[in-house]
Amino acid sequence: QTQNEQVQGFEDSRRLTGPNLYLPGCGVALEVLGGKTPPDKVLDVWQKYVLTAFENLHWAPPEIVIRRHLTGVSLAFSAPADQLYAATEVNEWAWLKTVASAQEFYSPAAPSLKDDEAAFHTLEKIATAESNPVLIELIGASDEKKLPTYYDDEFFSIGEGQGSQTWAIDALPSTASIEWGKFSRIPTALITGSNGKTTTTRL
């Protein structure tokens, strides 16, 4: 805890696999420690490193969202659905690059904070290992047909309820082999807030 605070570490770095507080789709978010919001010039540098990494990985420019609050800040950005682990590495690297004092403590197994070329090489290897172009193609085809998709590290599903099918993430079918007519969706309402969710649901 003391060391993390000393190097301005981060409290949480996570994947966002669907619509979330920050973005309408998937991405990643990192929550910074420190008890206060970093100044704008620090946040600008953080974003610059994120964009530089995206450019070197040949990813489409992300949507970036900064959420300031009384005890710190979160930075989230959109990322390819099959590259979310790599994207968390990008976010962590970009933040720790921004905080110069962190360099002494950062793990040598992670992307280098002192050699950008080496860092991008490491990030590219992580992204390549995670890449799943068939998954991206299936998500795109499902979106075109307005069918919901769900996926995690092990499984991928199209449709909902009886009108759905699930495959292992490492044994996905081609889009051409899928019988699209058998899929359907279930109308869904989402209820959120601090008070009244149960009452509203029952009504």
Image: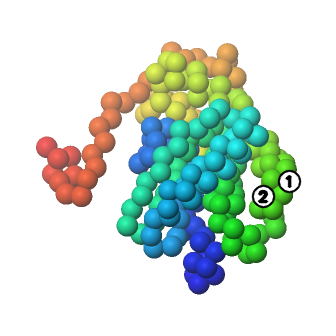
- Closer to us: 75 or 97: 97
From what the image shows, is residue 20 above or below residue 104?
Answer: above
Question: Is residue 189 visible in this depiction of the protein?
Answer: yes
At 86% from the left and 53% from the top, the residue drawn is: 118
| Residue density around tag 2, few if under 14, some if 14–19, many if 20 or more, within 10 Å | many
Give the label on residue 111, or none: 2
Give the label on residue 5, or none: none
Q: Looking at this view, name the residue that lies furthest to the front.
A: 41
Q: Are marks 2 and 1 in contact (CB under 8 Å)?
A: yes
At 76% from the left and 40% from the top, the residue drawn is: 56
Q: Tell me which label, 2 or 1, sits earlier in the chain.
A: 2
Say what amino acid the circle numbered 2 marks. Answer: Pro
Residue 157 position in % (x across, y down): 55, 35
Residue 194, picture quadrant: bottom left
From what the image shows, is residue 195 above or below residue 1?
Answer: above
Q: Looking at this view, name the residue that lies furthest to the bottom.
A: 2
Element type at mark 1: helix
> Which corner quadrant holds the N terminus?
bottom right
| Residue density around tag 1, few if under 14, some if 14–19, many if 20 or more, within 10 Å | few
Say what amino acid the circle numbered 1 marks. Answer: Ala
At 49% from the left and 62% from the top, the residue drawn is: 39
Q: Which residue is mark 1?
A: 118
Question: Is residue 132 visible in this depiction of the protein?
Answer: no
Residue 61 position in % (x across, y down): 62, 35
